[in-house]
Image (cartoon, helix red, strand yellow):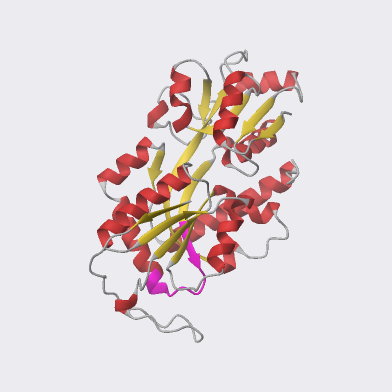
Amino acid sequence: MLRHIRYTGAACAIGLLVAAAAASPISAQSYPSALIRIVVAAASGTPPDIISRLVANDVAQSEGWRMIVEDKPGAMQTIAGAEVLRQPADGQTVVSVSLPGMVAPALLPNLNYSLEKDFTPVVKLSTSYNVLVVHPSLPVKSVSELVAHLKSHPDKLTYSSGGFGTPAHLAGELFKLQTGVRATHVPYQALPQAIGDLISGTNQFMFVTTLPVIDLIATGKLRALAVTAPERVAALKEVPTVGEAGFPDLVVQDWVGYLVKTGTPKEVVIRLNEAINKSLAKPAIRASLTKLGAEPAGGGPDEFAKFLSSQTAYWAKVVKDSGMKMHQ
């Protein structure tokens, strides 16, 4: 799916260095010299897609750049990653990734690229957290009660997700690892299907992004036990954090961020970072992210790089310790 965001305006002048010996020089006036592609590693209408478009739209308006946002979901975000690596390292093709992209190296041993070596972080756009919800027929009202119920019914309950390697799946696997419970993961091709079968009682619990279940919680169709955040989230202030519930190691942060192909001139990375941070600082953008159940992030490329490195190492250990396999 393609949605074009086109704006005209004066190009911002910044000094650019020669990218590499084999690359052509990029002048201050030539960046961006054409359309900037934002390749989103998620399906249309999902939070990463909506957030990527929201930020790209504002950057295009503010900077007078021409931008296009293109969705290329699948294969734990590696389809989008591979697409960007086929393009020149000039900063005019950007990949928008989230948590599953950092888990892919641990789950896909034959992955033909290295996230650390082949991509350069630009900026983290947003952070968000999941809420642990259960079907109201389940006789539990806290995380501790859910754990006790699962332990007394090993392998009898199921939890759903919008697909293998999604944040919902990863949080569920971490939950099993941290608590020692046994439950079966049921992946779906799309998040609405997973939520629908949770409402019907086909599955019993789920870690899910907050936005699509706020009304379901309010109307009693689902019961919220805890949010996977370090602090209570604004949209569900009455719901305790996993730390308050006695499980501080179950904090799971999802996020959306931009990367470019390694070899992109440092000045281009900095220019992109500055433009995006400027948009993220706007009250209107911050308010829009809050409505989506997300928080604006921002910061420098080095800061984002350290975050990604820690995330990759953390989830690699979770994958190893939990025994997660692609056929699950």
Query: Residue 244, how many percent across, how many down?
Result: 50, 27
The answer to which image quadrant residue 82 occupies is bottom right
Residue sitting at x 42%, y 22%: 238
Give the residues drawn in magenta, as a range. Answer: 258-268
Give the quadrant of the C terminus.
top right
Query: Residue 72, how many percent across, how many down?
Result: 54, 54
Residue sitting at x 68%, y 18%: 149
Of residue 199 and residue 325, the one placed in the foreground of this image is 199
Query: Residue 305, how many percent across, how many down?
Result: 49, 60
Of residue 322 and residue 68, the one placed in the foreground of this image is 68
- Farthest residue toward the left? 10
- Answer with left or right where residue 31 lies relative to residue 178: left
- Answer with left or right where residue 162 lies relative to residue 68: right
How many tags in the picture?
0
- Above or below residue 57? Residue 159 is above
Residue sitting at x 42%, y 26%: 236
Query: Residue 102, how many percent across, how many down?
Result: 59, 53
Q: Is residue 108 magenta?
A: no
- Answer with left or right where residue 58 lies relative to residue 94: left
